[in-house]
Image (spheres, coloured by chain):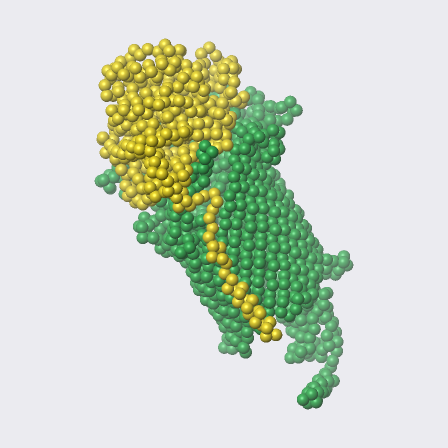
Chain colours: A yellow, B green
Amino acid sequence: MRINILKYITLSGALLLSACSSDFLETAPSDETGAETVFESTANAKLVINGMAKIMTTQQMGSQGFNGEGTIKMYYGNYPGNHFNVGLTGWANVINGNYYDNTTSIYNYYPWHYYYKLIANANEVIHNIEGAEGPQNEKDYIKAQALSYRAYSYTMLAQLYGNRWEDSNNGATKALVLRLEPTSDSMPLSTLGEVYDQIYEDLDLALFLYDRAEYTRTENYEVDAKVAEAIYARAAINKQDYPTAITYASQARSEHPLMSVEDYKAGFANPTNEWIWSSYGALDETLYFYSYFAYIAYNSTASAVRTYPKRMSKELYDQVPETDIRRDLFLDPEGFDYNENTGEAGDDLDAHARDRFPALAGNAKVYTHMQFKISANDMPGVGNLNHFRSSEMVLIEAEARYFENPADTRIGDLLEELIVSTGRDPNYTLTASGSDLLEEIKKYRAIELWGEGFDWFDHKRWGDPIDRKGVDEGGNFLRPMAVRIEPQEKNKWTWRTPQRETDNNDLID
Amino acid sequence: MNVKLSKFLTFLMLLMISSYAFAQEKRINGTVTDPSGSPLLGATLLVKGTTNGTSTDFDGNFNIKVNVGDNLEVTYIGFETKTVTVDSRDTYTIVLDPSSNVMDEVLIVAYGTASKESITGSITSVSSESIAKRAISSATGALEGSAAGIQVNNTSPGSDPEIQIRGFTSINGSNAPLYVVDGVPYSGNISDISPSDIESISVLKDASASTLYGNRASNGVIMIQTKVGKGEGGMNVSIKQGFFNRGISEYDRIGPDEFMETMWQGYRNSLLSDDPSLSMEEANVYASNNLVQDYLKLNIYNQADGDLFTEDGKLRSDAQILDGYRGDLDWYDGIERTGYRQEYNVSARNSNDKGGVFYSVGYLNEEHYVIKSDFDRFNARLNADYKANEWLGYGLNLTGTHQKATTLSGTPSSSNSFVNPFMYARNIAPIYPVYLHDPQTGDYLLDENGNRMYDGGEDTRNQYVGRHTIWENELDSQRSFRNTLNGQVYTDITFLKDFTLSLRGDLSVRNEENQSYNNAIIGDGAGNGGRAKRTIYRYKTYTGQQLLNWNRSFGNHNLEVLAGHESYSDNYNYLYGYKTNETFPGKEDFINFTEITNLYDYGHSYTTEGYLSRAKYNFDHKYYAEASFRRDGSSKFSKKKRWGNFWSVGGSWIVSKEDFFNLDFVDNLKFRASYGEVGSDQGIGRYAYHALYDIRQNANLAALFKSQNAAEDLIWETSASIGAALEGRIFNRMNFNIEYFDKRSQNLLFDINLPLSAGSTSTSSAVSTITQNIGTISNSGLELSFDIDLIRNQDWYWNVGANATIMKNKIVRLPEENRENGIISGNFKRAEGRSIYDFYMYQFAGVDQMTGEALYEVDAEKYNVNGSNPDGETVPDEFFREINGEYYTTNTTYGRRDWSGSAIPDVYGSFSTEVGWKNFTLSGIFTYSVGGKVYDYSYASLMSMSGNPSALHKDVLNSWNGIPDGMTETSADRIDANGTPEVNFSRSTYNNATSNRFLQDGSYLVVKNITLSYNLPQDIAERMKLSSMNFNIGVENLATFTKLTGMNPQQSFAGSSQNAFVTPRTFTLGVNVGL
């Protein structure tokens, strides 16, 4: 009996004191990893650089169409531009720029969300990379890559949320939060000038580090010195800093010869020599219906393409010479039946289009002037997405030279290099001069880069109005989109600081 | 000594015999029944003042020797004790009334049971009888309206209702209570447990009652006890059959004719505002000629596109909808149906003095009122216990369920999804048909087999092109399969007389597989040649418990002490696979697809550990005191901040047991009070303290990006609650309970929004957050409840009851840096002195009767309005209005936000009534809520119009349409505060901006349940060789009354209503047979 009691006491005592082992309460996820692991080594830190590449092609905010960089091109560069025609009357508010000062609209805060997400990751790398294990040259180029991403993000943000340079009182107007460390406290807006100064500084340091590390990349989606130079050129042309733009536009394309006619007609879904930087895309990493290609690629099976094919404005199309191969990439309705009000093809035009472009989905709609420039590798919209190519650099240089000296003979050489030497229009000869020469540069920029997300940005930079012609005015836009928007209207095309920033940042009112 | 004893005994016997001989002794017999005539087995009969007694047998019969004039006391648990004086009769029928004196009730409490009398905290319970009456798939649905302080929201079919106890303790996400099933924390789905297996559900509302579940108890605890084998053996069969339909009607939307005219106006007005050079006549003509072509695409009328409208935008009298389109414009027709519900349960129990066993099997099949939303459940349970000897008891519970559900994306989180049938059918413009028609004649187009063909909209619609909710729903499938196996073993070892050691182990494993298939013809799968997705969840949860109890009574002192240890581990593995490009249509197996687009899995785990103790003391069952302490650790916190201490004290006083208390009409009066602090780690993710990077893939290489900011200093959120209550019974007819509570959550776990420029920590929304412990919230209020027997006689009884919770939610403290400006989150702003759901919105001032524009109050603090802020920007002229000396803006960007009321009701509760007549009982439960606002997203969207055709609410017909007669620039009534702005495609975004204009009154009354039941008289049942038989007819959610028709006021506790499933109305007929 007594023995039993002792037994019970021992038993219960043991059980009551039987705390779990000391690591019972230590848990960690397997689909995420801790910051300490990430910056443990340069090998791991490289994966954050790759993470930034991924953010550029990741669905954002769970909302249709928000896919990283492709959305910037589509909703911010193409849709509200002058030469991009999409028959979505319900999108007239986006297309006509009615949300610039709607600080709660998803269109208002998307670029802010997206680019600051890139910046936050870049800041983590820049801040932590020195402490990682690994060779110095790896630390150097990883840091250079992070600086390149940061400079790119600020360059794009400045064009959206900053005034056009000539409205900025030489850079004195407020533009962005210039966040350079992984912090989260309130910060005031910096001026547009300060933002560009920082972009330059980041790129200077990046170029120095790429050089010191003797970095050469292996894949087109990686960033290297040429990418940094291309960013430099784009930033400088927007800042109207023409000498800098000339220098870097020329350097950036030095290893990327302009593409051939064959490459030009291959669908813009795979890197060519000319591509300076792009995002990777493949079927096993598909973005489904969110991707850029699911909104534009002519062969896409997405209904956004099949029912609303993307078209060139009739005014621009009519300016493309008959001998230019780029004219072939848009559907000429001449001599065929179509609905004059909507542009929808009649039976013969429809058949003609399918005959020329058999990849067109069977249930896709055919419209006049629809594009066949961009196609997808896989469905519904898989492709590699180009961000910088040498043609843009040529056009930046030409534009910069024009503003430096309209009589510079290199301008003609540059245009001929782009148009004639590449075979895009073997019969082209430059005759324009003076202000017509600027118009010529603008026209070829519009033709060469159509659909690649430059249209609105260019018009904003130039201070040119958007002037779309409706059918009754000889154009091909539906009435709700056939508007004229002056450069000084609509908050000077400057997106206002989103409420998601100002509500949580006491230093901005 | 032996001799002495025997002498004494003999003397005693002699004494007894002699007294026996002098009395008029006789033997009587009879039955003890309840008011409905059902026999009460095991009722105790005792001759007062003696030890002479007996109890009734299985049929409620008794037989006892008594003397005339003896007082026979009849007692039965749950019934009023009755005293019968023996007279000359030999046969007695004794009817006991059900006890409303709940003081004897035994309730399930944390780690044990307790008599209601002894409880110092706030506990209410629902019995198996009230659950059995209801046609519910999840037992916790029966809590709605059952007691004060409990709010229940409805969700989609097959899922568990959301429950909230005494307000909002946490801002971050979940305010859901902890579920404890058979003594251990439960993380599975309540709908896995068959309601008919449940003996009781107890709700622990305050800290004193729940401290012992310290770590997760701050939102209250719902304890579910399943049935066990006890009492006489028996078998029960119950069958329920019923049908479903939609319990809340649709919003009042306009039909095709009014829609056409409204769209015409919207277009005409936008032409005028976009191009001021246009004359009214030109705009009218242009709109008439181009509305169909530019916006609508389809013309279902018998006139040409340009011949539909008169000059002022009315449909011409000869414009008629083509016959073929009529009857094909209501999309709900193809989505809704009359659903069917069937439920079968068989259970049996038997026991003896060594132990008992309860076993049951059940089957439930629900076909909901929306096509392709079905639920099937098979369940079986075995609960057995055995007492090996006086010191060792042992038991085992084993449950298995298999569930199959066909589901639709119809929850509020998919409120904007094309595949949400409510979003689609509600918002599609009333001019678009379901099927293809010949546009000339309107006749249906038929395929080669003579069948109608669905219209995917590619040629006909300017809305939802390539999408078709009915067609997609027909071809697609979305199913889930769930298998659950739950086992629990326990043993109780009694030793040293007063000690009991209980060891309990519980293991729950769950596998859930969700399959979805999208066809290759229409919708999401069309672009990929069809696609299929699998998500497989594997859950494992286990709990280990070691408890030591010590009970001791010394005279009038009764003491009970408990100490224990508990560990809990919850982990799951998630596998996700995706394939595209189907071989054969309609086959959802992965082998039918040829491209892999996604395949990954990962695992998560969460663990907690706690040490607990409790002491209970009472003196003479009159004064009670109780104290508990618990120390908990959670894996969600960093090592240095992991452990928290929680405790409570409580006391109660049975005033009516005092000698000085001599109010005859008071049968029972108890006062109780308690204070305690419990913890919560629910508001945060499993890995809340880590700095984390997402792992993705780019170019076949891992891609990492930041997904969470580190929060090493996070500590337990604690909720301190104080409560006091007075409860009792008077006039032997009325029970009442008045309770005050104040629950304060401190160190709230909260995701603080950082400036967005700090970088989004999410890809799914544009927010940069960090989790912090911030501030204090209080929920204080009064809970009142009563019920009264208005009639109680031989044939009739009528009881009515009601309860109300009057609650105030208030943020008591915020961190220093947020004190001045508060924390803005969506439509809410958190500020000291305000509730956590106080709307903070742009202020709609009214409609300018000269222009039809919506006017909002202008922000004169931020912008320079006539010198109000000389350093600020001015509001662009385009959006600035000065009317009669006051300033307004037409664009909320320049508007002022202000407090706009709270989503939290002022008072909520329920009424109930029960009428009995002979064997019939009719009962009803009504729930209500008063005050509290709702931002109705569905309504706001039905009131807005851009160029995208989309259904419109009939209130749009009140839109401003031209300057009213006599109105001038300076008229005093130039602004109509209740006006509806003009319809205008291009100005809709300003006119219908998110503002307080769309806030609705969230008050509601719901006829929750009406049941009529009938017990077959005992003699008839017996003739049918049955022990009992009962029929009932019931309806759940008979009606919901709200100010705005269509709104579902019970969709969210946070004041929003979106496109989602609405409450089903369920009619059921049931029969229960006791064998």
- Quadrant of the rendered image containing residue A37: top left
- Quarter in which the N terminus of chain B is drawn: bottom right
Given residues B887 and B258, the one toward you in this image is: B887
Residue occupying the point 56% across, 42% down: B536
In the image, residue B76 lies at what x, y percent?
A: 64, 68
Given residues B57 and B198, the one toward you in this image is: B198
Residue occupying the point 48% across, 32% down: A285
In the image, residue A287 lies at what x, y percent?
A: 47, 32
Q: Is residue B210 above or below residue B410?
A: below
- Quadrant of the rendered image containing residue A255: top left
Residue occupying the point 49% across, 19% down: A366
In the image, residue A449 lies at what x, y percent?
A: 37, 21
Given residues B331 and A132, the one toward you in this image is: A132
- Quarter in which the C terminus of chain B is drawn: bottom right
Residue B626 appears in the figure:
yes
Residue at far front of view: A135
Is B753 placed left or right of B699 in the picture? Answer: left
Residue A80 appears in the figure:
no
Q: Is residue B522 above or below residue A371?
A: below
Given residues A421 and B102, the one toward you in this image is: A421
The total of numbered circles placed on residues is: 0
Q: Is residue B52 above or below residue B1010?
A: below
Residue occupying the point 66% across, 66% down: B388
Is A227 placed left or right of B20 in the picture? Answer: left
In the image, residue B1032 lies at what x, y percent?
A: 66, 53
